[in-house]
């Protein structure tokens, strides 16, 4: 189930980015859309593309939870930036944190292993924790480095 949630997120994040500034729950509902991290990688260029893929990777495990529905765009972007940076540079077991000073929401991303898959891609398993209003959610995923340098969720 976690695998499907992670894969369907990036397109929904991209669609949410195109929507107005409606309630956070509207954005959360869009996260249930279909398309996945692969589709998210098809939108935007540069940092916009990075953000779509990273947010999809991170938010996939949070879809449907109240915590996931409570994340606003600034939370998502802070989490996305931290995740891309962490997956690219942090040693296994080293946590990186993000915090949105406006909402007070925060979280961590921790790579738990690194390996090379049968296609030669470097992949990292990671855990993420998101804290909102005293509630904490933890999720796990795997992302592989793409030729353009982005990390894309594979499960």
Image (cartoon, helix red, strand yellow):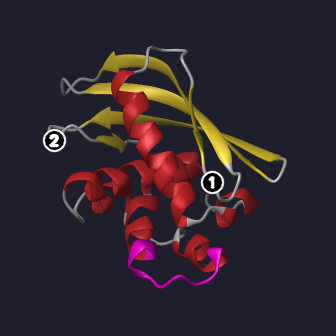
Check disc 1: other Cα within 10 Å, few if <14, some if 14-19, many if 20+.
Answer: many
- Residue for badge 2: 148
86 in relation to 6, above or below: above
Q: Which mark, by number, is residue 62? A: 1
138 in relation to 117, above or below: below
Mark 2 lies on a secondary structure that is loop
Residue extending farthest to the left is: 147
Q: Identify which residue is drawn at 16% across, 41% down.
A: 148
Residue 1 appearing in the image: no
116 in relation to 77, above or below: above
Q: Identify which residue is drawn at 40% across, 60% down.
A: 10
As for residue 46 lying within the magenta part, the answer is: no
Mark 1 lies on a secondary structure that is helix
Coordinates of residue 51 in the picture (x, y in percent): 36, 53
Coordinates of residue 2 in the picture (x, y in percent): 58, 47
Q: Identify which residue is drawn at 41% across, 72% down.
A: 17
Q: Is residue 144 left or right of residue 30?
A: left
Region of the chain picked out in magenta, as a range: 16-24
- Pick whichever, 48 or 33, lies toward us: 48
């Amino acid at each position: 189930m976690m695998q499907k949630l992670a894969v369907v997120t990036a397109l929904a994040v991209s669609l949410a980015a195109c929507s107005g500034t409606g309630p956070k729950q509207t954005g959360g509902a869009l996260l249930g859309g279909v398309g996945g991290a692969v589709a998210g990688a098809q939108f935007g260029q540069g940092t916009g593309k990075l953000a779509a893929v990273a947010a999809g990777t991170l938010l996939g495990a949070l879809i449907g939870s109240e915590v996931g529905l409570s994340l606003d765009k600034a939370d998502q972007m802070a989490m996305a930036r931290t995740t891309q940076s962490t997956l690219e540079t942090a040693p296994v077991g080293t946590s990186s944190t993000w915090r949105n000073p406006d909402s007070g929401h925060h979280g961590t991303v921790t790579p738990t292993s690194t390996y090379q898959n049968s296609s030669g891609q470097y992949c990292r398993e990671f855990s993420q924790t998101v804290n909102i209003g005293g509630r904490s959610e933890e999720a796990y995923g795997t992302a592989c480095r793409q030729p353009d340098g982005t990390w894309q969720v594979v499960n």
